[in-house]
Image (spheres, helix red, strand yellow):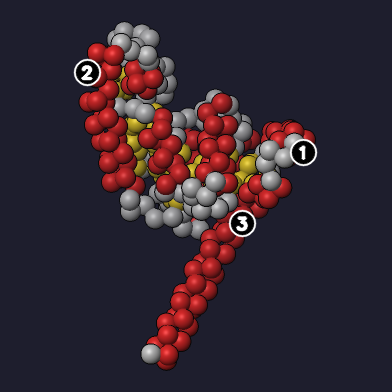
Amino acid sequence: MARRKKEPERRRGAVVVRGTGKEGRRTEDTELLRAQPPVLFRDTDTWRTLRITGEFVEGFDALAAVGPAISIFGSARIGRRNRYYGAARRLAARLAEEGYAIITGGGPGVMEAANRGAKEAGGLSIGCNIELPFEQGLNEYVDLGMEFRYFFVRKVMFVKYAEGFVIFPGGFGTLDELFESLTLIQTGKVEHFPVVLYGKDYWSGLIAWIRERPLYEEKISPQDLDLVTITDNVEEACAAIVRHRSHARREVEAESVAATEEAVTEARRS
């Protein structure tokens, strides 16, 4: 008997539609960013803000109790035999063993590898997918999955619930996630979480350019480069994440001791 051909999937936020449909359909992000006449803007974008708010609420509600997590980014275009697939799978497993949940974009490639490693190690595997005109659904290794209409809502979820970021080789989307993470850390919008670039041969050229141009021309500070760890070793990458957690705990304990001592001193004075 002939094998049934898999029907194409289309997504409308949390809704999955299988079967034939109009190709090239605009996504919600496209509609939001498309210039419109003033009347249409008043008629549609006001209501669209409610949908955006709803996505934030659903995302916050779903992820509020996940505990410490690491966001792992990388290309959707690598196969299972690629060395970075294996590395992402092993690293996610090690981080899961250390008690971290793993957050990815929920698609194939590096994202699938990281979700797979987390699931195999008994950790929580999270996928935050995005509505695109021609794109895949959630990979099979996601335990907790969400489908987002808007890129900016999805990116907030990557950052808000993470205690570190691991960036594997990837394209424009991966670079966007890398520089957004660094910008938020540099400007103090999020705490100085560790950022690990996995793949020295892939990232070394970029770092060299940053040193030769932005740093040399004083567009960034030398300490900005201290935000990044570059490695080809799974254990080294894991250690960079865990080391930061230990350091953060010591800082919290020190602050607690200082606050206690201050309270005791104030009590004696009164």
The numbered mark, 1 or 3, whose residue comes first in the sequence reads 1
The amino acid sitting under disc 2 is: Asp
Q: Residue at x 36, y 8 (%)?
A: 23
| Foreground residue among 141 and 257 | 257
Marking on residue 239: 3
Placement of 16 over or under 35, stated as above or below: below
Q: Can you see residue 234?
A: no
Q: Can you see residue 149?
A: yes
Which percent across, then down, holds residue 203? 69, 36
Which of the 4 image quadrants contains residue 45?
top left
Q: Residue at x 63, y 42 (%)?
A: 197
The amino acid sitting under disc 3 is: Ala
The numbered mark, 1 or 2, whose residue comes first in the sequence reads 2
Q: Residue at x 49, y 49 (%)?
A: 190
Placement of 256 over or under 19, stated as above or below: below
Placement of 83 over or under 254, stated as above or below: above
SS class of the residue under badge 3? helix
Which of the 4 image quadrants contains residue 179?
top right
Q: Residues within 10 Å of mark 2 (few under 14, many from 20)?
A: few
Which percent across, then down, holds residue 77? 54, 25
The numbered mark, 2 or 3, whose residue comes first in the sequence reads 2
Which percent across, then down, holds residue 172? 56, 26
Q: Residues within 10 Å of mark 3 (few under 14, many from 20)?
A: some
Residue, disc 2: 43
User: CA–CA distance between discs 1 and 3?
Assistant: 30 Å
Whether residues under marks 2 and 3 lie with C-beta atoms below 8 angstroms apart, the answer is no
The amino acid sitting under disc 1 is: Tyr
Residue, disc 1: 216
| Foreground residue among 3 and 137 | 137
User: CA–CA distance between discs 1 and 2?
Assistant: 49 Å
SS class of the residue under badge 2? helix
